[in-house]
Image (tube, rainbow, N blue to C red):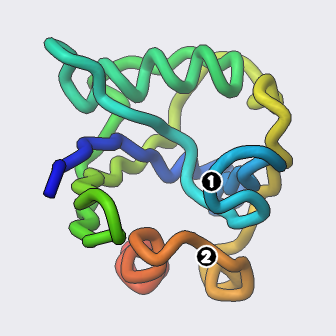
Amino acid sequence: MKVILVSAVALIDVDGRVLLAQRPPGKSMAGLWEFPGGKVEAGETPEAALIRELQEELGIDTWASCLAPLTFASHAYDDFHLLMPLFACRKWNGTPQAREGQTLKWVRANALKDYPMPPADIPLIPILRDWL
């Protein structure tokens, strides 16, 4: 089974809320909510992938020094295995904007469980909630 490395981030605002993005129509798992991020390309570190993805998807800039490793997901889907480090980030430049048709929402940690998420993301919720 192919292993896919995806890097994700919990962007945390000054009020302690976490940014979620809803997968747009036409993408796999459309309508589900997830932490921003994306695939790690060949020769790229998970941190570099996040910096690139945050610029592309949300129009914000951050730095590797602002990405704190928090936890990871390891989940077998039908046709691939997902390995996803989750970083926490409290510092970035710019205001997150949906650039790829996704819906964005700032959510309190104790309300994350109320948003339908891909199976790989669900085990991350209690870890993030306890950390915040």
Viewed as shown, does residue 77 lie left or right of 56? left
Q: Which mark is residue 118?
A: none
From the image, which quarter does the N terminus lie in?
bottom left
Residue 130 pos. (x, y %): 40, 83
- Does residue 9 sit above or below 129 in this rendering? above
**Between marks 1 and 2 in the image, the one whose residue lies nearer the viewer:** 1
Q: Nearer the viewer, residue 7 or 69?
A: 7
Q: Label 2 near label 1: C-beta < 8 Å?
A: no
Identify which residue is drawn at 39% across, 74% down: 124
Q: Nearer the viewer, residue 60 or 66?
A: 60
Q: Which residue is mark 2?
A: 109
The answer to whether residue 132 is visible is: no
- Does residue 99 sit above or below 83 in this rendering? above
Viewed as shown, does residue 39 lie left or right of 33? left
Identify which residue is drawn at 46% across, 16% down: 52
> Which comes before the other along the chain, label 1 or label 2?
1
Residue 55 pos. (x, y %): 59, 16
Identify which residue is drawn at 81% across, 55% down: 105
Q: Which residue is mark 1?
A: 28
How crowded pointer 2 is (Cα within 10 Å; few <14, some 14-19, many 20+) is rated as many
Viewed as shown, does residue 22 lie left or right of 47? right
The amino acid type found where label 2 is placed reads: Ala
